[in-house]
Amino acid sequence: MFMGEYQHSIDDKGRLTIPAKFREGLGQSFVVTRGLDQCLFVYPMDEWKALEERLKSLPFTKADARAFTRFFFSGATECEWDKQGRVNIPPTLREHAGIQKECVVIGVSNRVEIWSKEKWESYFEGAEDSFSEIAEKLVDFGF
């Protein structure tokens, strides 16, 4: 499981150091793709394969299913670590997420997300006030 929030910088060549505990969970080979909310999603291969199977079961006759799978898979790239534990984020993915220098790497259960620092702060600030309302609608903590 991935959890936590970490501040990092991406270098001029597009390389990003991912926290060591996330690297362990992602394995040697993993997938980075366009995420929702203008961030990047990073999946370990087993999670990616499970997600791929779920998306393949969507009805291709539905325009929304075709649009989403195009968006999701066209941006996907299989990645590996370099010797310093960095991953090279392709320019198209950096552009999608608006990542130029400062970024935030967060753990979200079965995936890692990479955000530009500005977009993360804006998202978090905007959503913070509604977290309790969202939780009330979606989660039964059993208390």
Image (tube, grey):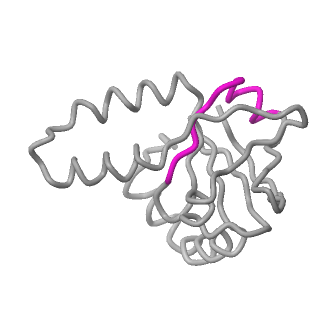
Q: Is residue 81 left or right of residue 62?
A: right
Q: Position of residue 69 (x, y in %)?
A: 31, 45
Taking the spot 79% from the left edge, 44% from the top edge, the residue there is 18
Pick whichever, 57 or 128, lies toward us: 57
Q: Is residue 137 left or right of residue 114?
A: left
Pick whichever, 101 or 50, lies toward us: 101
Q: Position of residue 4 (x, y in %)?
A: 74, 47
Taking the spot 12% from the left edge, 48% from the top edge, the residue there is 62
Q: Position of residue 125 (x, y in %)?
A: 63, 76
Splitting the image into 4 quarters, where does residue 95 fall? bottom right
| Residue 40 vertical position relative to residue 100 in the rendered view, above or below | above
| Residue 98 vertical position relative to residue 7 in the rendered view, above or below | below
Taking the spot 75% from the left edge, 53% from the top edge, the residue there is 5
Pick whichever, 17 or 130, lies toward us: 17
Answer whether residue 25 is magenta in the image.
yes
Q: Is residue 65 left or right of residue 54?
A: left
Q: Is residue 109 left or right of residue 51?
A: right
Answer whether residue 124 is magenta in the image.
no
Taking the spot 59% from the left edge, 42% from the top edge, the residue there is 42
Q: Bounds of the magenta span? A: 21-34
Pick whichever, 52 or 128, lies toward us: 52
Q: Position of residue 73 (x, y in %)?
A: 40, 43
| Residue 21 vertical position relative to residue 98 in the rendered view, above or below | above
